[in-house]
Image (cartoon, helix red, strand yellow):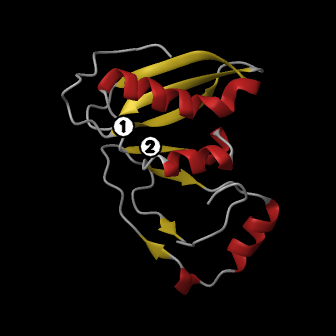
Amino acid sequence: MLECQGRIPRDRHDSGGACHAVAVGPQILGFLVQDADRRVFCCANCDIRKEDQAAQILRFVDFWKERTGRLPQELVFDSQFTPHANLNRINQAGIQFITLRRRNRKMLERLHTTGSSAWRRIHIDGISRKYANPRILDERITLDGYD
């Protein structure tokens, strides 16, 4: 992975970053990491082949530890970016993470039939958030390959 902007000081108490996978071409993905506190990109890899996608989040964890001397405290990324087994490895390392669940037709059908009382509205702080007050359904689920 390549460092994009700025330095990550070793003595700074960084929280990790938000990880984004971006389609660069038909078979190439880009991996961008934004420092949540500073709002700058601190890491990028823009030539990821589709078959190498699953390992990128773990490569970033290794990069962060080598660069700062500790594991990231928190990661935010799309769950489709890595398999459940890697989510399990991140959890076992004690790294907190937030992902959006993978959606499929059956799940969407169930969500559309879930009563409105099961949903709650939250507020997400941000400078230019289009959807600052989304409705969420908070559920505990079991994932294959995840303890």
**Outermost residue toward the left in this view:** 11
Location of residue 46 (image quadrant) = top right
- Left or right, 40 with respect to 80, comes to left
Q: Residue at x 32, y 47 (%)?
A: 126
Q: Is residue 35 above or below residue 101?
A: above
- Contact between labelled residues 1 and 2, with CB atoms less than 8 Å apart: yes
Q: Is residue 95 above or below residue 107?
A: above
Q: Identify residue for label 1.
A: 16
Q: Identify residue for label 2.
A: 75
User: Distance between the Cα atoms at labels 2 and 1?
Assistant: 6 Å
Q: Residue at x 64, y 57 (%)?
A: 146
Residue 23 picture location, percent across and down: 66, 26
Residue 29 picture location, percent across and down: 66, 23
Location of residue 116 (image quadrant) = bottom right
Three-letter amino acid code at the position of disc 2? Leu
Three-letter amino acid code at the position of disc 1? Gly
Q: Considering depth in this image, is 42 or 54 the residue closer to the camera?
A: 54
**Outermost residue toward the right in this view:** 105
Residue 129 picture location, percent across and down: 39, 48
First-in-chain label (2 vs 1): 1
Location of residue 12 (image quadrant) = top left
Element type where label 1 sits in the image: strand
Quadrant housing the C terminus? bottom right
- Left or right, 88 with respect to 8, comes to right
Q: Residue at x 39, y 56 (%)?
A: 132
Q: Residue at x 22, y 36 (%)?
A: 13
Q: Is residue 41 above or below residue 132?
A: above
Q: Considering depth in this image, is 39 or 15 the residue closer to the camera?
A: 15
Q: How many labels sit on residues? A: 2
Element type where label 2 sits in the image: strand
**Mark sitting on residue 46:** none
Residue 84 picture location, percent across and down: 67, 50
